[in-house]
Amino acid sequence: MYMRIFLLIFIVFLLCSCQPQSHDHTLRISATNWLGYTPLFYAKEKGSLALIDIKLINVVSLSENMYLFKAGNSDAFCGTQYELSILKSQLPNVVPIMLFDRSNGGDMVMSNHSISELQNSTNEIDAYLEMDSINFTVLNDFIYKFNIDEKRVNYIDRDQSAISSLTNNEPNKQILIVTYMPYDSKLKHNGFKEIISTKNGLDLLVIDALFTRTEEFIAHKAQFIALKKLVDEAIASLHSDPKEFYETIKPYFTDLTYEDFVTELHDIEWINKELEDALKLRMQESDFSTKELI
């Protein structure tokens, strides 16, 4: 344990001594409570992030995550290529530098009605989602796929914390919820059902990664390399002892049981190691750059 800590500190010191630094503050990384980012939470709780001078900022929505980064209040953020595409028009120098996972069922549409009931009705549909995020793309894909009249849809912008508190207390009212793990667990208990996901029915590529500006990557490359090592070690710890991993990150997911945690892990695919050729091709087709990836 002490040897690993010493090596991390030594790597950061060695690389930093060879590179100019643009900041004198702790490197700030923001992330939502998506299960794919739990390796960061694990590293934080183990005290490892502090050793390489990284602060993790926990946010409740993907939109807040982007705005925090755009305003300069975080130096890197965790998100998908869809949030990246929104930022690119204003910050063309933002690049992906580290991969976490691919959603394989972790992003979904939930409802209190079946797809056929939604199709065959003329009633209005209240759709809850985070507008400036992958949620919007998921919802539009669903609407297009099942030929639902968009004029029937009321778009209601909420963060996932607020969305997860919705209850099915008006069963005749048609509700759509675009969400992601682990918020779906609470919604299931509140009377909603998954009707489609990135595993079943939605042909969307959703990649979760760490993004930063090119100049930040150059200035803090040593820390990002050390962080990548910690992420890989955390994922290895998850595989070897999922119970210990869960107990470590549990403070971030108070409503998530261990059983639900293990079940929902099947809906993400870790891509922190070697990428398959087919996935590389899909990433290229989606204009997802791999040039700066650690």
Image (cartoon, rainbow, N blue to C red):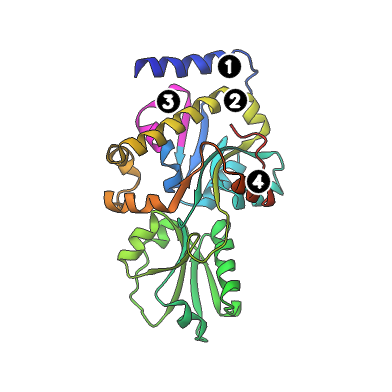
Separation of disc 3 and disc 1 at Cα?
17 Å
Q: Nearer the viewer, residue 122 or 3?
A: 3
Separation of disc 4 and disc 3 at Cα?
30 Å
Q: Amino acid at mark 2?
A: Lys
Separation of disc 4 and disc 2 at Cα?
20 Å
Q: Quadrant of residue 247?
A: top left
Left/right placement of residue 11 relative to residue 96 reads: left
Around disc 2, counting alpha carbons within 10 Å, would you say few (fewer than 14), some (14 to 19), or many (20 or more)? Answer: some
Give percent across and percent down for residue 46.
35, 29
Disc 1 and disc 2 in contact, CB within 8 angstroms? yes
Separation of disc 4 and disc 1 at Cα?
27 Å
Give percent across and percent down for residue 61.
48, 52
| Res 50 label | 3
In the picture of the structure, the residue carrying the numbered disc 4 is: 288
Q: Which residues are magenta?
A: 41-56
Q: Earlier in the sequence, mark 2 or mark 3?
A: 3
Q: Earlier in the sequence, mark 1 or mark 2?
A: 1
Give percent across and percent down for residue 293.
61, 35
Q: Callout 1: helix, strand or loop?
A: helix
Q: Residue at x 32, y 67 (%)?
A: 190
Q: Amino acid at mark 1?
A: Leu
Q: Callout 2: helix, strand or loop?
A: helix
Q: Looking at the image, is 278 positioned above or below residue 214?
A: below
In the image, residue 45 lies in the stretch drawn in magenta: yes
Q: Quadrant of residue 145?
A: bottom right
| Res 221 label | 2
Q: Callout 3: helix, strand or loop?
A: helix
